[in-house]
Image (tube, rainbow, N blue to C red):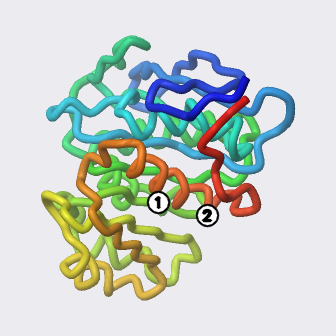
Amino acid sequence: MTELVRAATVLPAVRRDIELQTDDGLTLVGELAVPESHDPIATLVCLHPLPTAGGFMDSHILRKAAARLPAMADIAVLRFNFRGVSSPRGTSQGEFGHGDDERFDLDAAMAFVAAHGLPDPWLLGWSFGTEVALKHGLEHPVVGAILLSPPLHRTEQTELAQWAGSGKRLVAVIPELDDYLRPAEAAERFAVVPECELVAVEGGKHLWVGENQTYRVLTEIVERLNPALLPLPTEWE
């Protein structure tokens, strides 16, 4: 029986709870989802929105990426709670680090990726998660970073400029109606990284609410990680 893909759709994958150990002595909780019957072609390391505004590993775009992309696009999806953050999966130790101490959390996630041989990792940051990606992602062997609704509140221009000529890809997906950074300003801020791909999404909003916006964001992700499997299906048997 074929059904429409909806907000609550969870497609087949191998999912397991994981723990990440940081260099400053904390245990973080998370989940790894991989394709059910074969190896992934690429890996998505998800960095969630602002914890003090309700962001966590289950923030809806990240949850839907984990629910769909292992099956639809042969992508492994790693999600975890930053330090001090709770979700139905559990609570990560520690307390909010304002984007600075979260570098240890990213270190732990990337150590897990390396230890388990997960291929071609990309960072997927959303809002606050983009700040962690931009500030600390260059230290890691990632293919690149996809930034959803980057506010650029905590990232200095000097930090952003370091991505220029780094050899790592940078994709900024900017909602037309974002609450913090809209396409015209984004073009100015990201001009220090000439190779950055700016994707302005007409009608898009910071929280990417609704199936149309979810589909657009997941499409932008798959276009970079495994474009051969586009377009993404809207129905599943």
Residue in the foreground of this view, choosing between 235 and 48: 235
Residue type, label 2: Arg
Residue 146: give its label. Answer: 1
131 or 2, which lies in front? Answer: 2
Q: Is residue 103 above or below residue 147?
A: above
Q: Among all residues in the image, which is located at the extreme front?
A: 1
Query: Taking 177 as reference, is 195 left or right?
Result: right
The residue that appears at 49% across and 32% down in the rendered structure is 6
**Extreme-right residue of the structure:** 38
Indicate the quadrant containing the N terminus: top left, top right, bottom left or bottom right.
top right
Residue 229 shown left or right of residue 145 in the figure? right
Can you tell which mark lies on residue 224? 2
**Residue 40 % position (x, y):** 76, 42
Tag 1 near tag 2, CB within 8 Å = yes
Q: Earlier in the sequence, mark 1 or mark 2?
A: 1
- In space, the residues marked 1 and 2 are separated at their CA atoms by 9 Å
Query: Helix, strand, or loop for circle 2?
Result: helix
Report x, y in % for residue 232: 64, 51
The secondary element bearing badge 1 is classed as strand
Q: Check the picture and name the quadrant holding the C terminus.
A: top right
State the image coordinates of residue 77 (x, y, percent, origin top left): 59, 37
The image shows residue 207, relative to residue 158, as above or below, that is above
Which residue type does callout 1 highlight? Answer: Ile
Q: Residue at x 34, y 79 (%)?
A: 161
- Compared across the picture, whether 164 is left or right of 40 comes to left
Q: Residues within 10 Å of mark 2 (few under 14, many from 20)?
A: some
Q: Position of residue 206 (x, y in %)?
A: 24, 53
Q: Quadrant of residue 155?
A: bottom left
Q: Say if 211 sits above or below 58 in the image.
A: below
Which residue is depicted at the point 34% across and 42% down? 210
- In the image, taking residue 80 as reference, residue 102 lies left or right, namely left
